[in-house]
Image: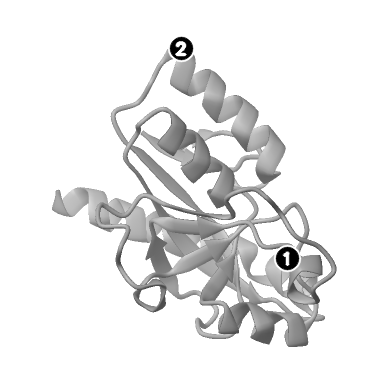
Amino acid sequence: MIVCAGRNEIFDFAHPIGVGLIESTMNLTRLALFDKPDFLLFIGSAGSYGNHKIFDIVTSKTAANIELGFLDDKCYTPLENVVSAEENQNVPRETLSIVNSSNYITTDSVSSKKFLTLGLELENMEFFALLSVAKEYDIPVAGVFIVTNYCDTNAHKDFMKNHKQAKQVLTEFMRNYRGKK
């Protein structure tokens, strides 16, 4: 099953699950309980912390939930904050494309550089929740992301400017990919 966030990020071939960590967790849990899919593929947009360019398409099976306060040693968590669908979870983190998830969008390039030093490459609001639910219900999962913006002061403006074209590029990528199977 192909899923996407929803609202302004809907694709005609994907089931919307909601925006952010909470909506996506609730809706995906409901889906897993009542109509459990054999496989989940999340598609959506992402902000780049600097390693990926606008309109790059990146795949991932690993997500984190690292908040900005953590970067500045202003908080801690007793919870697991990295989850992976990789078959071999002993794969070194530097070889994975790790997607960071939060209900907040990073707009500070200094913070983006700090995220990169932790091995995080992209920012997407839903992916950590999706991987967490998939792990709980033993559903294989992966994500395909298109970069719409850098995580800097222009994040929102660039997202809005690039979003329509990014959806078209991602749709074409998915149609070509599905046609090869």
Question: Distance from label 2 to label 1 (Cα)?
Answer: 35 Å
**Quadrant, the N terminus:** top left
Instruction: Return the residue at label 2.
Output: 34
The crowding category of the residue bearing disc 2, from other C-alpha atoms within 10 Å (few below 14, some 14 to 19, many at least 20), is few
The foreground one among 23 and 165 is 23
Q: Is residue 153 above or below residue 126?
A: below
Q: What residue is drawn where x is 79% and y is 73%?
A: 73
Q: Is residue 92 above or below residue 133?
A: below
Type of residue at label 2? Phe
| Location of residue 81 by image quarter | bottom right
Q: What residue is drawn where x is 63% and y is 63%?
A: 163
Type of residue at label 1? Met
Mark seen at residue 150 = none
Considering every residue shown, the one lying at the far front of the view is: 78
The foreground one among 68 and 49 is 68
Residue 35 drawn at (x, y percent):
41, 16
Cβ atoms at labels 2 and 1 below 8 Å apart: no
Q: Is residue 116 above or below residue 26?
A: below
Q: What residue is drawn where x is 30% and y is 63%?
A: 90
Q: What residue is drawn where x is 74% and y is 85%?
A: 109
Mark seen at residue 160 = 1
Residue 125 drawn at (x, y percent):
65, 53
Question: In this orientation, does residue 152 appear?
Answer: yes
